[in-house]
Image (cartoon, rainbow, N blue to C red):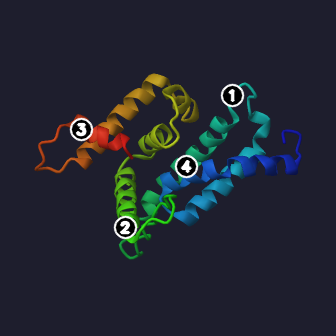
Amino acid sequence: AMQGDQEAFAEIVYSFQDAVYNLCYRMLNERTEAEDATQEAFIRAFNNLHRYDVNRSFKTWLLSIASNHCIDRLRKRRLKYLSLDEPLPSNMQMALSSENPGPEAVAVQNEHSSYIQALLDDLSPDDRAGIVLKYWYDYSYAEIAEVLDTTESAIKSRLFRARRALAEMMTPANDTTDDDRAINRLSEM
């Protein structure tokens, strides 16, 4: 692929398309935009293969391209969605795989997915990327720091603040539940 073989790069796309799409979808919360962002991430990766350091994980490098592209899209989107004349985007549901769940289970799953995505939407793009990489991809602090091009200590601080913000959003104002229990609920996502 680094020598310009498009068939070799097609194998890379086939191997990593689900991971890149899932990251884009979690960050952008819109199916068609996630598909566009996935395609753009692979185009950018192909055009920058000469910059890839073979000593790094290819998946980490590719996800860093995708996450940075999604962060850029989110920053541009904030201005676009301020118009009250445009209809709000439909709230797409994450398809959770299971064997023929009943209607009630599907409704609960959709509600939970919408709730989690709404919480993620309230975070800054950088915090959202950190949370997605930590809790959906189970990346270490070092891997997240590499993807987001920052330090491990900055990621720890960012994730601490993001978890605290999510805990505050998850805890109703009249509930006396402490933040630790709310954070534990976050980790069950």
Q: Position of residue 158 (x, y in %)?
A: 39, 33
Label 3 crowding class (10 Å Cα cut-off): few <14, some 14-19, many 20+? Answer: few
Q: Position of residue 64 (x, y in %)?
A: 60, 39
Q: Nearer the viewer, mark 1 or mark 3?
A: 3
Return the residue nearer the eye: 14 or 6: 14
The amino acid on which the numbered mark 3 sits, given as a three-letter code, is: Arg
Residue at figure coordinates x 73%, y 29% from the top left:
53
Q: Position of residue 76 (x, y in %)?
A: 50, 56
State which quarter of the image contains the N terminus. top right
Q: How far, Cα to Cα, is label 4 from label 2?
A: 23 Å
Q: Quadrant of residue 164 in the image?
A: top left
Residue 54 visible in the picture: yes
Residue on which the image places disc 1: 56
Residue on which the image places disc 3: 181
Q: Earlier in the sequence, mark 4 or mark 1?
A: 4
Q: Position of residue 48 (x, y in %)?
A: 75, 41
Q: Earlier in the sequence, mark 1 or mark 2?
A: 1
Label 4 crowding class (10 Å Cα cut-off): few <14, some 14-19, many 20+? Answer: many
Q: How far, Cα to Cα, is label 4 from label 1?
A: 19 Å
Residue on which the image places disc 4: 23
Residue on which the image places disc 2: 107
Residue at figure coordinates x 49%, y 28% from the top left:
141
Q: Earlier in the sequence, mark 1 or mark 3?
A: 1
Q: Secondary structure at mark 3?
A: helix
Return the residue nearer the eye: 146 or 182: 182
Label 2 crowding class (10 Å Cα cut-off): few <14, some 14-19, many 20+? Answer: few
Decide: marks 4, 2 in contact (CB < 8 A)?
A: no
